[in-house]
Amino acid sequence: MRLSALALVFSLAAACQSGETNAALVPPRPSSYESVIAPILQQRCVGCHGAERAKGGLRLHTPVAIRAGGASGASLVAGDPASSELVRRLHLPLADEEHMPPDDKPQPEPTEIAALERWIAAGAPFEGEVEGLSVPARKPQPAASIVPPADPAALARLRAELVHVQPLSAASTSLWIDFAAIAPRAQDALVTELLAALRPQVAELALARSPVGAGTLAFCATLPGLTRLDLRDTKVGDVQLARLGAHPRVEELVLARTAITDASVDQLLSLPKLRHVYLWGCALSAESVARLRARPGLAVDFGDTPDAAIAQVEDPPKFTSDLPIPDLPPAGDPNAPVNAACPVTGSPINPKYTRTFEGRVFAFCCPNCPGEFDSDPAKYAAKFPGSR
């Protein structure tokens, strides 16, 4: 009997010890913010209000960013959903300019909005659990609205051509693409060739100062997710812009200093989602500008408002030989650059970026300019016939 009792004691002690060990191995439950709220914000908001982009100065990807608010002030009032800007914008009519998310973006389910309101009503805690708050059920997203990942080979080709490309956000497969580094040679054929395999992913496209024309605009009309198109300082005119058609997704058009005239007003008004158009430097009449501004929800930047005036213009930089440029090789060094200003941009050079042409070393201001130099080295080298 004594042995049986002793065995029972040891058995109970072992069971208690095992239970304590197992409890120690169980990870803590995630907070309601981590399990419910953060996924909603990530899916519905962070594409425009996250680490990569902050429309209206607002970021919603971390607790610190949420507490900081944006240009309109605090995004939420802990304990008061009705006074929270985030909730107010969710409940605005879909056609309202301030409604969030924009009407062409996937909208949160009523259960998701209810979850946000319950969390805010509980004080918007980032730690611990909120009673009654659970992961809301979501309708499956239509397959047609899912943007597939970009072809890695197509992305590599863009980068090899010095075209800037990056996702709109860490969680997005839609892309922002900018041809600024190779603008002088970004003609229709090259643009369409480089982007042909990325049609579903192109969302924001910058072609400023490039020689694009009707071919590129016709190609842009086939980009289903295009929301922003920058054509500033191009020769695009009324005929070329017409090739864009009534694109169903374009929200923002930058047409500053192009050949656009009054003849394009109907074209611009045909874009159903257009919210902002930049037309400063264009040959539009006051009547045409007024007609565009009469459309509800459309902001027209024509450079005629008081805040558009140039406050100050910096004087051109002046270089002097009184002091050596930092980090340049010593005088007489055969590897010393022959120029003090970048042959492409005219900015001060960074000796890290160089090219050798006809026995002379040329330095540039940034990693993009050597590629532009390579397109016509004799042209740029001619700016510096002698040594420094």
Image (spheres, grey):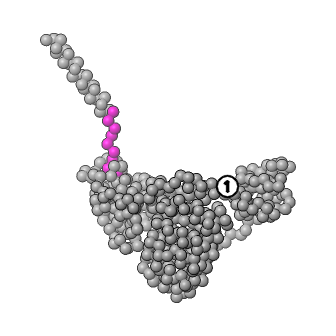
- Name the kind of residue labelled 1 in the image: Pro
* Residue 234 picture quarter: bottom right
Q: Within 10 Å of the Cα at label 1, are there few (<14), some (14-19), or many (20+) other Cα atoms?
A: some
Tell me residue 48's x, y (percent): 45, 61
Judging depth in this view, the residue of 71 and 44 nearest the camera is 44
Relative to 229, residue 149 above or below: above
Q: Is residue 311 magenta?
A: no
* Residue 347 shows up from this direction: no
Q: How many marks?
A: 1
Judging depth in this view, the residue of 48 and 193 nearest the camera is 193
Relative to 4, residue 83 above or below: below
Q: Residue at x 68, y 69 (%)?
A: 314
Tell me residue 23's x, y (percent): 29, 33
* Left or right relative to 334: residue 254: left
Q: Residue at x 22, y 20 (%)?
A: 11
Which residue reaches farthest left? 1
* Residue 315 picture quarter: bottom right
Q: Residue at x 49, y 83 (%)?
A: 266
* Left or right relative to 348: residue 215: left
* Residue 230 shows up from this direction: yes
Secondary structure of the residue carrying numbered label 1: loop
Judging depth in this view, the residue of 54 and 219 nearest the camera is 219
Q: Would you say the magenta stretch is mainly helix, strand or loop?
A: loop
Q: Start and end of the magenta stretch?
A: 25-33
Which residue reaches farthest bottom? 287
Quadrant (top left/top right/bottom left/bottom right) for the N terminus = top left
* Left or right relative to 325: residue 182: left
Quadrant (top left/top right/bottom left/bottom right) for the C terminus = bottom right
Tell me residue 39's x, y (percent): 37, 53
The residue that mark 1 highlights is 367
Q: Residue at x 75, y 62 (%)?
A: 376
